[in-house]
Amino acid sequence: MVTKEAEAGSKTSGYVADVMAQIVARNPAEPEFHQAVGEVLESLGPVLERRPDYRSARILERIVEPERVVMFRVPWQDDQGEIHVNRGVRVEMNSAIGPYKGGLRFHASVNLGILKFLAFEQIFKNSLTTLPMGGGKGGSDFDSKGKSDAEVMRFCQSFMTELHRHIGANTDVPAGDIGVGGREIGFLFGQYKRLRNEFTGVLTGKGLNWGGSLIRPEATGYGAVYFAAEMLVTRRETLDGKVCLVSGSGNVAQYTVEKLLELGAKPVTLSDSNGYIYDEAGIDKEKLAFVKELKNVRRGRIKEYADKSKNVVYTATDSSVDHNPLWGHKAQCAFPCATQNEVNSKDAASLLRNGVTLVSEGANMPVTLEGVKQFLDANILYGPGKAANAGGVATSGLEMTQNSLRLNWTREEVDGRLQQIMKAIHKACYDTAVDFGAPGNYVKGANIAGFVKVADAMLDQGLV
Ligand code: NDP
């Protein structure tokens, strides 16, 4: 006999499958967007059963549709006077709980589907931070590699010449992401101020002496490590002495390594799109300082790390192999901090085989759906990006607060708040997973906890 509960469950999964099929049909050629939505919808069955009003108000159908997408031409001239045309995009996904908030990504691989996946993730991440921020994301297919500062400035000025019409301190507040760091935020802010004749907190990640917050550069990496430490507490463990694999070598990777060192762990890898280094002796403070100078000042390649230090192995990226050898070293913890889908099912299997029992995502959606399933089946501590890397946007929220108050908090104050927020996010995910019958499943916990707050706000605000 089919029980009432089983019948309700199968009706809900049929409904979720129908919504997913519509999304795939209406958003063709956007695999990353399908992946991000699919992962969230898969978690929401139990909530939809408890709350039939979400279904009758069509919350799922509404939450996957951006409130607005702005797409625009970005023409600019290089140092030789040649003209180039890039595409700029801002996806304003959801403003139910606050102004749109989310980074700008400048990378050759950027397309609308990638920005929609990032904007969608951002809704739930921002909701988890406990701060009043909606979800958005934007960027361009501009590749800053090999460009002079003057070229990057001209590009940023052209980009902001259009974007300024659509953003504002109470409307939409962009920040950095891949390819957008302090230099780019400076050029973007300067042009916004010039066009609008106003000095406001319209961007976060600003320089310290013009409205930025202490700890914002560190926040995503530090936060991913704080989240990892919280997960370990549930198994009465700490990071002390643990060997850690870290990918990427940009903002998030650098500060992940810095916090790991502070907590006594031993990071042994870093990468960029050309290859990765394996330093069995461990990346120490001095070597990290070299990486910061290499990447943030000289804008060089990670291979130089191996050229400089003894007993370091550099492996160049080989696009003909179907896995990433970085994830094949013996370790207890992994922090993917480069980009989406950098850990596939083969990589997930080799991480598990090599003794990894904790994965904390500094990057957004770095693990494929099959890889996530393997981690959940193996019952390891797996912190999904929308929870584990939320420290960056949370500290952007703190930057917005300081801008509104027109004052600057100390490093200790901001770091203390960041730690409290990461603890609160961990607790919300952990408790929600228990409440919905999936203890230890941070994917379900994060998706459900992030969703409910936004869905309730959407119900309160009527059909908009
Ligand atoms: P950076 O541009 O500072 O660094 C990105 C790093 O990842 C670089 O080492 C880059 O190498 C590598 N990378 C980028 N794309 C690829 C690719 N397609 N294949 C291989 N390597 C690649 O960016 P961030 O550190 O800021 O961002 C890293 C991740 O963290 C992203 O997923 C981002 O969305 C996420 N994130 C960032 C936040 C922030 O506050 N900055 C907040 C939350 C999440 P190369 O230089 O060769 O391209």
Image (cartoon, helix red, strand yellow):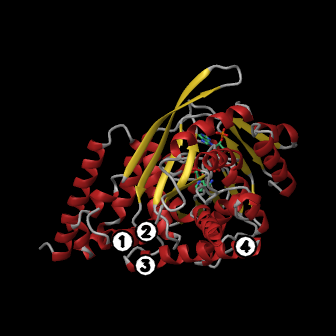
Q: Closer to the camera: disc 3 or disc 2?
A: 2
Asked if marks 2 and 1 touch (Cβ < 8 Å), the reply is yes
Q: Amino acid at mark 1?
A: Ala
Residue 374 x %, y %: 47, 57
Secondary element at image label 4 = loop
Looking at the image, residue 273 lies above or below residue 176: above
Cβ of mark 2 under 8 Å from ligand 1: the answer is no
Q: Which residue is mark 4?
A: 409
Secondary element at image label 3 = helix
Q: Residues within 10 Å of mark 2 (few under 14, many from 20)?
A: many
What residue is at 11 percent from the left and 73 percent from the top? 1
Q: Which residue is mark 2?
A: 97
Q: Which residue is mark 3?
A: 434
Compare marks 4 and 2 and give the one earlier in the sequence.
Answer: 2
Q: Amino acid at mark 4?
A: Trp
Secondary element at image label 1 = helix
CA–CA distance in space, label 4 to label 2: 25 Å
CA–CA distance in space, label 3 to label 4: 36 Å
Asked if marks 4 and 1 touch (Cβ < 8 Å), the reply is no
Q: Closer to the camera: disc 3 or disc 4?
A: 4
- The answer to whether residue 371 of the structure is visible from this angle is no
Q: Closer to the camera: disc 3 or disc 1?
A: 1
What residue is at 58 percent from the left and 38 percent from the top? 107
Asked if marks 3 and 1 touch (Cβ < 8 Å), the reply is no
Residue 203 x %, y %: 60, 55
